Image: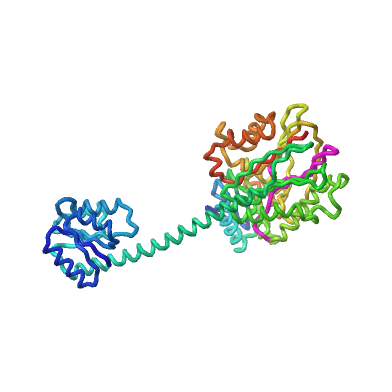
Amino acid sequence: MKILVVDDARDMRIVIQHLLKKLGHDVDTAVDGEDGWAKLQENNYQVVVSDWVMPKADGIELCKRIRAAEFPQYIYFILLTGMSGKQNLMSGIEAGADDFATKPAEITELEIRLRSAQRVVDLETTLAQRNVALHEAHSRIQEDLVNAEKTQLSLLPEPLDTDYVKSAWLYKPAIYVGGDTFNYFSPASDILVFFSIDISGHGISSSMLSMSLQSSLAFKRGLYGTPPIQHDNIADMPALFAHNLNKMIVEYKTDHYLTMIFGIIDFKNKDVHYVQAGHPHPMWFDKKTESLQCLEVNGFPVGLWDGAEYESQHRKFSKGDKFIVYSDGISENKSALNNELLEADNLYEHFNEIKNGSVDEIIEKISSTWLTEDQMKALPDDLSILAFEFK
Amino acid sequence: MNINITKKDSLSIISLNETRLDASIAPQFKQEMEKIIADGNTQIILDISKLSFMDSSSLGAMVAVLKAMGNQGKMVVSGASGVVLDLFKLTRMDNVFTLVETTEDAQQYFTETA
């Protein structure tokens, strides 16, 4: 080992240096604490054997400085002591000394102390190497997750602003990537298919299924039945879709299942057809009466139960009506406005307060007034809210 | 995870002494329940009256337990209330599970169907 011997007595330095060299170590010397401290800055010593009482900085002071500094390697500190009394040893331990050796130095004792030192130094080295490896792995995973989050966000659709409808959304995963997703697409100019999905659990495993569904559901024509999506066959399509998707997910044999609102908006006939599959109750703003209604329809989640049956729900809309679907992630948070959980009646009241705003304003209010910035940074579950306003 | 079993004749009353059942303990809950079933407990009352929160992964675990039970026996869930009961209703799982209010009601259920 590379050892620094610090002692103000020249004869002691020479004796210890000689003994340690005899034991096969690489030894430098310093004349006091200050000199030792200076030498420590230039060399990677693994062990310091230091006298206690010295001019300038003493052994205790040197030890304290070493412990307060951040050397890349652990430095094992042995204090030489001619003093007796437990109080003194205690102050040595408190300063950060690892061991003590008595003066005058004796070869067998030094050998025993250095064996202990070797064990600790080896252990510290292994730990340090493992820490570096762990740190590297952690950074790599972190970086991967940040990229995955970007990919996931990039696959979400742009907000809509067409002749028929305007949409806005909020999406924030709990840990980088989330199990929530949503999408919409138009199989014909006056038809819009949409879904809001929450895969059970969250994190990487949920998000893999969620991304796979997000990108594939639009194209798996079989899930919608055989004929193309048209005005005359869309009313029952949500239930059929849920039924077929349920079969598909049950066959996947994953531990995950999902809740969703899947719907089709018929702009020509002014109908919304949707299926509720265990997803939180959507909110409906009726422009004529200026009232907000919670659509209390219950349904089986998808992929949880092979015998599940589904029902399509139908609703006429008029200009100015709004339809808001969201995942249950919101309900695990306490509102910044009244410190109550955003669930049940409290959640309704929160929506009710902002129902008159545009969909953009609604989404903006949710992220800026319901939840604090700190809450948004560490959500307990994925959060997704999708709002439509009919024109 | 704190689960207590008490036996009463052929019934096994399993009390879940937790206030939250979420992703952090759902797998353990599922494993312990599956073991209890594999050990030959076929008439089970699962008392979840202490639960004040349950998330989607736990509902998945509950269904897995129900599936593990299959046709070998019967499980009655007692004491679901508040948001826990809401979750059962929202997902229509109140139709799949036999839900009762108290463990006494559950015992009554087994007496009547015996």
Q: Residue at x 74, y 58 (%)?
A: A248
Q: Name the residue furthest front.
A: A42
Q: Where is A126 relative to A361, above or below?
A: below
Q: Where is A173 relative to A322, above or below?
A: below
Q: Which residues are magenta?
A: A253-281
Closer to the camera in the image, A268 or A224: A268
Tell me the colour scheme of the image. Answer: rainbow
Residue A391 in the image: state x and y as whole percent.
78, 33
Magenta stretch encompasses residue A150: no
A104 left or right of A146 in image: left
Q: Quadrant of the C terminus of chain B?
A: bottom right
Residue A235 in the image: state x and y as whole percent.
84, 44
Residue A278 showing in the rendered view: no
A111 left or right of A71 in image: left
Residue A15 showing in the rendered view: yes
Closer to the camera in the image, A285 or A71: A71
Magenta stretch encompasses residue A259: yes
Q: Where is A72 relative to A381, above or below?
A: below
Residue A336 in the image: state x and y as whole percent.
55, 34
Q: Name the residue furthest top.
A: A289
